[in-house]
Image: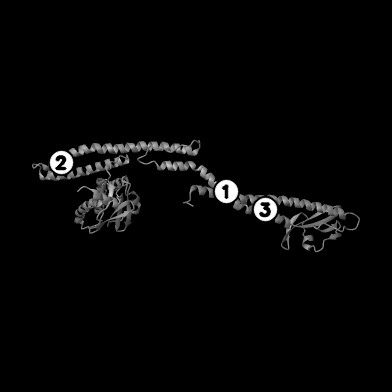
Amino acid sequence: MKRWPLRWKIALYAAGLGVIATIAGAATTWTLMHYAEMRAFDRRLAEEANEALRVFSAPDSPPLRVSDHVAAVWTDRGELRYRAPNVQSLVLEDGRPDLHTRKIDGQKFRVGEFRAYGLRARLAANLADISAIGRDIIFGMFGAIPTVLAVVLLGGRWVAGQALGPVDAIQQAAAQISPKHLDQRLPVPATNDEIASLISVLNSTFDRLQRSFEQSARFSADASHHLKTPIAVLRAGIEEILRDPDTPAKQQARADALLHQTHQLTSIAENLLLLARADAGRLELKFVEFDLREVLDGAVDDLRALAEPNRISIDARLPNSLPVRADRFAVALITQNLIDNAVKFNRSGGRIQLQTDCNGDYATLSIGNNGKEIPHDRVEHIFERFYRARGDQQTPGHGLGLSIARELARAHGGDLVLAQRERDWTEFRLRLPRVQMDNWQSKIANRPS
């Protein structure tokens, strides 16, 4: 039942309680009615006994007709005045004068003695009629269970739907809240109940989150923007030192290392600025139609140069043409981040495979490589910023490449996912909107020569 909708859970719980209540009510009703019937039955037996003793006390001969429940009549001296035919000795030799129930030949009888007019009468009455009434009550109650179950189930479903109606509105409104629409708020119902209070608390929480998020994004953007100028000045100064022929070789080596670090700082600042713009929904993408094969050819050339030192083989399975509609620079950046990771996290003598495919209105690019398996507990974090999936601090990088790649992919209306994670194979899959081949060929044919 974990996956069932809450409305049906409430309805089923209500139906279950309804069935339990019906059974409990049936048991209580049967007990009370049985007790009342037995009291009334005992009173009738007492009346019959009194009437029989009054008749037998007359000096005349015994009456021709006696109550069917009278088993025998004696005088106080023990003289038998009357005995019903076929009466069993168990009834007469019971030994208990009070009214009580006992089973004779598989049937229940109400047996007891009554005294009046100097006589003593023994009565025995079959309880079959009372037992039948009890069974009718039980059958009637249990026969009502399906009706009760259906009514409570459907009624509970309706009541739950009415009660959870505001929750649907909350769910739909909450789905609209995103980094690009942080100003959206949940509608507060007019009812002054717990749900209204909960929504007010959630809206207050969203207000705080929006302020915090905007401050964080603004800080990242401002810091990245203001860092670019001093880093550029620093890089220019180091490059000037490297170009100076009077700089000693030892200082040249140190300056070269510093220049490498300034390039790293520049990359980090640019990446943080890009992510800040993505968070604020201000990514400026220039959508054009171009051939993805051209971008991939350049990426493969770079990939071969990067892979050669570690003897990594390249298997590029690319089509002759794959038109897409996207920002060419952003797609090149995504591809570059993916092939950089494919090289960095590959093993010596490994393999990298690039493969494209078309699925409906989207083109997909899969980039796989040999390397250590990403631990299972880290898979869900691999697209988080500054997160190192394999925890290898000796591998260069800052944990921003995959975050940037996925942000750019989603900004295009596509996505970037981890498609495979096996012992010796890791594969990422990029999806981008593509151009239908007929339209692309028509555009190529109409292009001025």
Crowd tier of the residue under label 3, counting other residues whose Cα lies within 10 Å: few below 14, some 14–19, many 20 or above: some
Relative placement, left or right, of 249 versus 153 is left
In primary-sequence order, the first of circles 2 and 1 is: 1
**Label 2 belongs to which residue?**
238
* Nearer the observer, 27 or 407: 407
* Camera sees residue 292: yes
Residue at 58 percent of width and 49 percent of height: 151
Q: Which mark is residue 152?
A: 1
In what element is the residue under mark 1?
Answer: helix
Question: Tags 1 and 3 in contact by the CB under 8 Å rule?
Answer: no
Question: Tags 3 and 2 in contact by the CB under 8 Å rule?
Answer: no
**Amino acid at the residue labelled 1:** Val
**Amino acid at the residue labelled 2:** Ile
**Amino acid at the residue labelled 3:** Ile
In what element is the residue under mark 3?
Answer: helix
| Percent x, y of residue 33 | 70, 50
| Count of marks placed on residues | 3
Mark 2 to mark 1 CA distance (whole Å)? 81 Å
**Label 3 belongs to which residue?**
137
* Nearer the observer, 55 or 300: 300
| Percent x, y of residue 359 | 33, 54
Mark 1 to mark 3 CA distance (whole Å)? 22 Å
In primary-sequence order, the first of circles 1 and 3 is: 3
Q: Quadrant of residue 200?
A: top left
- Mark 2 or 1, closer to the camera: 1
In what element is the residue under mark 2?
Answer: helix
Q: Which mark is residue 256?
A: none
* Nearer the observer, 75 or 64: 64
- Mark 1 or 3, closer to the camera: 1
Residue furthest to the right in view is 60
| Percent x, y of residue 439 | 29, 50
